Structure formats: C-alpha cells, structure tokens
Image (spheres, helix red, strand yellow):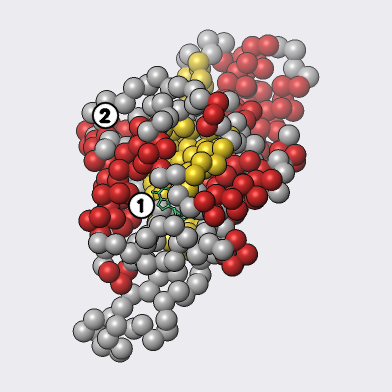
C-alpha cells in the first residue's frame, strides 16, 4: 500500500494535522521516505491540492524527530526543510497525549474523559467564581528595609499592621491548633470562637500584606476529637475573603499520634473513631493563580517538580523538638518543598507564627528573604540562633 492509500481504519480514529504547501506534489517522495519507517496504523499522510494532511494516532515522537533531523540536516532545499520542520512543530505542540512504552498515544488514551469543549464549559461554570469580584490592588510594594531578614518578637496582629499592603510573595505558616499544647507564651486551648476570632484577625492582615499573585500556605491539623474541621473553616475564611483556593497538599507523617486504644466504639458501628496520620496544607492565591518572577530564580529541579506536584507528600515529622524546646515544629523538608514549589529565590517569605524559626532558617538557606513573627521571646532567640548556624546553600548558584 502506498502512502497515498488510506489504511483500513476509519479516519475518526486519527487526529489530523494540515500543513499548507502550494508545491506539495514535488515533495511527495521525501514525505514517502520519511513516513515509510512508521506503521501506517500509527501515522500516515495524504496530499491535497494546497498541502498535506497528517493522520496521527500514535508515534515514537523522539524517533520521528530524529528522522526529521536526518532528512533536513544536509538538505539544501529550504522549502523542504521548512515543510518537514513545520510537520514536526505541529506534532510537537500537541501536549495532550498518553504514553505506551516509547510511544505517545494521541487518540483513545482519555476515553474515560467524556468532557468536550472543556474550556468553554469552564467559562460557563465560572472558574473560582467566589473570588472573581475581589477588590485587590495590583500595585505591589517593596517591604521597608527594617523588616527584611528579621525575626520580630510580638503579636502578629499588631506587628503586621506596620507593614504596607502587597509586599510579601509567600506566607507559609502553621498556626497554633488549639490542642492545649504547652507553648512558652501562648495559651493553647481556648473556646473555639475566641480561637477563630484571633486567628482570623491575623489572617486578615496576612491577606492585606500579600502581593497580588502572592500565595499563602497554611499547614493545619484539625482536632478531630472535637469534631471541628479547622482546615475547612480556614479555607472558607480565605474564600469568603476572595482568595483563590489553589489546592491542598496532604502531608502524611505516617505516625499514629492517637492512642491505639482510642477506638471510639470498639468493633461496633455505634461510634467508631477515625484516626489520621496526616495534616493538610491549604494553599491560596491572591488575585491571580500566577506568581510573577524571573525563571532564572526558580531553583526546583525537574525531578523535584514532577514528584512534588503530586499533592501527597510523605515526610517524617520533626523529631528534634526537644532539642529546640518547642512542642509543635514542622520539619525543614516540608518548608523546603513549599518554598521551592511556590516561590522564587529572592522572594519575600513571611511566617506569622514562626516558632523556633523553621521557615526563616530554610528561607535563608534557599536564598529567599524572610520575616518571622513570634510571640515568645524564648522561641525568637532560638530562631535567631538557628539563623546564625544556617549557611546559604551555594549549590544553588
Ligand atoms: C505551631 S507553632 C509554629 C512552629 C513553627 N512552625 C516551627 O517549626 O517552629 C505556632 C507558634 O505560634 C506562636 N504564636 C501564637 N500566637 C501568636 C501570635 N498572636 N503572634 C505571633 N506568634 C504567635 C506560638 O508561640 C507558637 O510558637
């Protein structure tokens, strides 16, 4: 069968690409040679009066790219080179495909996705409809020098009031969870209404100081035994205040922090007690999902990116809490992932519940600017000490 014959497969089984060329007839032999190495069930072409139609079902793309390279490298006819490059370019720009061994599957890999005209339907539904009518200014401001690379002792609600609007790129924090932990200078375990009033007064300030396009990531572990879904309540708060919910990461610590005997109703459906080994990282964007920055200042590797965008992170909890004398630290690896995935080097990072300074230490190591606010003098001193012992990671440069 020549390349001009249509194989015995209905054409709806292929996607078609048309490349225009008024002198296509002259290039028939070159195309036939190029396509002869690929099964006609996978890809073939058909000449029409003003160009060529490529029928594509599946393809070892890198082998095809190599064939085009070989066909063009010593070819002096720029018309032919342009045609072949144009075919390659049009196939390369199809970003929606499945994988089977070395082949890209362009057809039939997403049969279970039944939604057509996805983009139009998104417009009809109203993507992040709850945040569309925000009044955020797009004018970002520089944070005053006195707040750059500092640990500040104080109540975040008060300290944050001294900052201008729109001056922070990323906030990463874990607030007190109201579990009744023994913090040095903060009463943990108050009435829930009182707890949320204070937390939201601080988060209101966080929203104000966040840049347009900035992100806030809140690590939160609900107190399941009180049946208060803090992560949902916090998420509702941010959405009511017009931030876009960018997603959530499940941080699995794989630790059973509830006693093995806490079963609720043992071996009975009357009231079983559910157990969790994970916390949630709720992520929000102010105004825009895109955060602008210089790509040269991105320090996440391809492997890290591929791994970390899968939103379940298995990271051990911090085991050094005794060393720092703090009851509720998060581990450095968690901060490292958040900072590399959601911020650029040189960005301004804020932690309004800075504890013994895990966020600020990692921010320094990863060449970000930082501001940590903490109500306990003791913890602030430890955070300062940690900064002194933290070197900038020169491998990044
Ligand atoms: C869960 S801990 C954060 C620990 C931190 N991520 C670390 O790794 O060290 C919460 C911290 O918030 C502090 N805190 C509580 N209320 C505060 C307030 N109003 N302003 C500033 N810090 C506060 C507590 O003292 C505590 O250290």
Which quarter shows the C terminus?
Answer: top right
- Circle 2: element type: loop
The residue sitting at 49% across, 26% down in the picture is 143
Residue 380 rendering spot, x and y as whole percentages: 55, 49
The residue sitting at 68% across, 28% down in the picture is 68
Give the side of residue 341 with respect to residue 287, left or right: right
Depth order, front residue of 390/282: 390
Give the side of residue 3 with respect to residue 113, left or right: right
Question: Looking at mark 2, is its residue's CB closer than 8 Å to ligand 1?
Answer: no
Depth order, front residue of 288/228: 228
- The label shown at residue 112 is 1
Mark 2 near mark 1, Cβ–Cβ under 8 Å? no
Residue 250 rendering spot, x and y as whole percentages: 44, 58
Quickly name the residue at label 2: 134
Q: Earlier in the sequence, mark 2 or mark 1?
A: 1
Give the side of residue 23 with respect to residue 269, left or right: right
The residue sitting at 42% across, 81% down in the picture is 259
Q: Residues within 10 Å of mark 2 (few under 14, many from 20)?
A: few
């Amino acid at each position: 069968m020549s390349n001009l014959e249509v194989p015995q497969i209905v054409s709806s089984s292929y996607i078609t690409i048309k490349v225009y060329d008024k002198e296509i007839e002259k290039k028939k032999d070159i195309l036939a040679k190029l396509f002869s190495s690929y099964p006609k069930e996978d890809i073939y072409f058909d000449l029409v009066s003003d160009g060529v139609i490529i029928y594509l079902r599946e393809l070892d793309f890198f082998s095809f790219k190599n064939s085009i390279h070989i066909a063009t490298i010593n070819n002096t006819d720029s018309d032919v080179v342009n045609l072949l490059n144009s075919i390659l370019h049009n196939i390369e720009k199809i970003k929606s495909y499945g994988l089977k061994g070395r082949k890209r599957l362009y057809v039939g890999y997403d049969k279970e996705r039944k939604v057509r005209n996805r983009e139009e339907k998104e417009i009809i539904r109203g993507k992040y409809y709850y945040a569309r009518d925000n009044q955020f200014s797009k004018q970002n401001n520089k944070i005053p020098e006195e707040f750059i690379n500092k640990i500040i002792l104080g109540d975040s609600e008060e300290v944050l009031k001294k900052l201008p609007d729109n001056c922070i790129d990323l906030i990463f924090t874990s607030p007190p969870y109201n579990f009744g932990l023994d913090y040095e200078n903060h009463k943990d375990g108050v009435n829930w209404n009182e707890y949320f009033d204070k937390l939201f007064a601080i988060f209101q300030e966080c929203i104000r100081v966040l840049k347009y396009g900035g992100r806030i990531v809140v690590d939160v572990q609900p107190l399941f035994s009180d049946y208060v879904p803090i992560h949902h309540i916090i998420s509702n708060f941010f959405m009511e205040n017009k931030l876009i919910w960018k997603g959530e990461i499940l941080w699995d610590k794989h630790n059973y922090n509830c006693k093995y005997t806490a079963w609720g109703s043992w071996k009975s459906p009357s009231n079983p007690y559910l157990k969790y080994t994970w916390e949630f990282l709720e992520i929000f964007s102010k105004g825009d999902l895109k955060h602008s920055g210089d790509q040269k200042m991105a320090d996440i590797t391809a492997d890290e990116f591929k791994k970390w965008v899968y939103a379940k992170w298995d990271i051990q909890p911090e085991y050094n809490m005794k060393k720092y004398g703090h009851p509720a630290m998060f581990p450095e690896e968690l901060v490292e992932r958040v900072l590399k995935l959601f911020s650029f080097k040189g960005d301004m990072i804020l932690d309004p519940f800075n504890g013994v300074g895990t966020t600020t230490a990692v921010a320094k190591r990863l060449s970000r600017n930082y501001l940590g606010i903490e109500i306990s003098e003791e913890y602030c001193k430890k955070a300062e000490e940690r900064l002194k012992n933290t070197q900038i990671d020169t491998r990044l440069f």
